[in-house]
Image: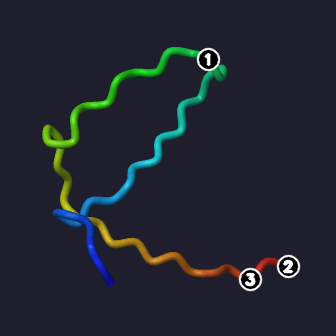
Amino acid sequence: MPRAPQDRVPVIIRWDGVYDAEVPELPEPERITWAVHRWRLESVDGE
């Protein structure tokens, strides 16, 4: 499977506010780095 440069992933941020509200600026990507976290998503049987 191909990987993005430096294993980059998209970051989804939910901003709780009205649609046309001003949102804060996010830091430039080169200014922030976090350790890699691996997530495993599993199905849950619901009744």
Closer to the camera, 28 or 16? 28
Q: How is the image coloured?
A: rainbow
Disc 3 versus disc 2: distance between alpha carbons?
Answer: 7 Å
Residue occupying image coordinates x 33% and y 84% = 1
Mark closer to the chain start, 2 or 1: 1
Within 10 Å of disc 2 (Cα), the crowding (few <14, some 14-19, many 20+) is few
Q: Which residue is mark 1?
A: 20
Within 10 Å of disc 1 (Cα), the crowding (few <14, some 14-19, many 20+) is few
Closer to the camera, 10 or 41? 10
Residue occupying image coordinates x 65% and y 23% = 19
Residue occupying image coordinates x 25% and y 31% = 27
* Disc on res. 42: none
Residue type at mark 1 is Asp
Q: Is residue 3 left or right of residue 12?
A: left
Residue occupying image coordinates x 39% and y 49% = 11
Q: Are marks 2 and 1 in contact (CB under 8 Å)?
A: no
Within 10 Å of disc 3 (Cα), the crowding (few <14, some 14-19, many 20+) is few
Closer to the camera, 26 or 5? 5
Disc 1, SS: loop
Q: Nearer the viewer, mark 2 or mark 1?
A: 1
Q: Which residue is mark 3?
A: 45
Q: Is residue 18 left or right of residue 34?
A: right
Residue type at mark 2 is Glu
Q: Which residue is mark 2?
A: 47
Residue type at mark 3 is Asp
x and y, in percent, of residue 12 in the image:
46, 47
Disc 3, SS: loop
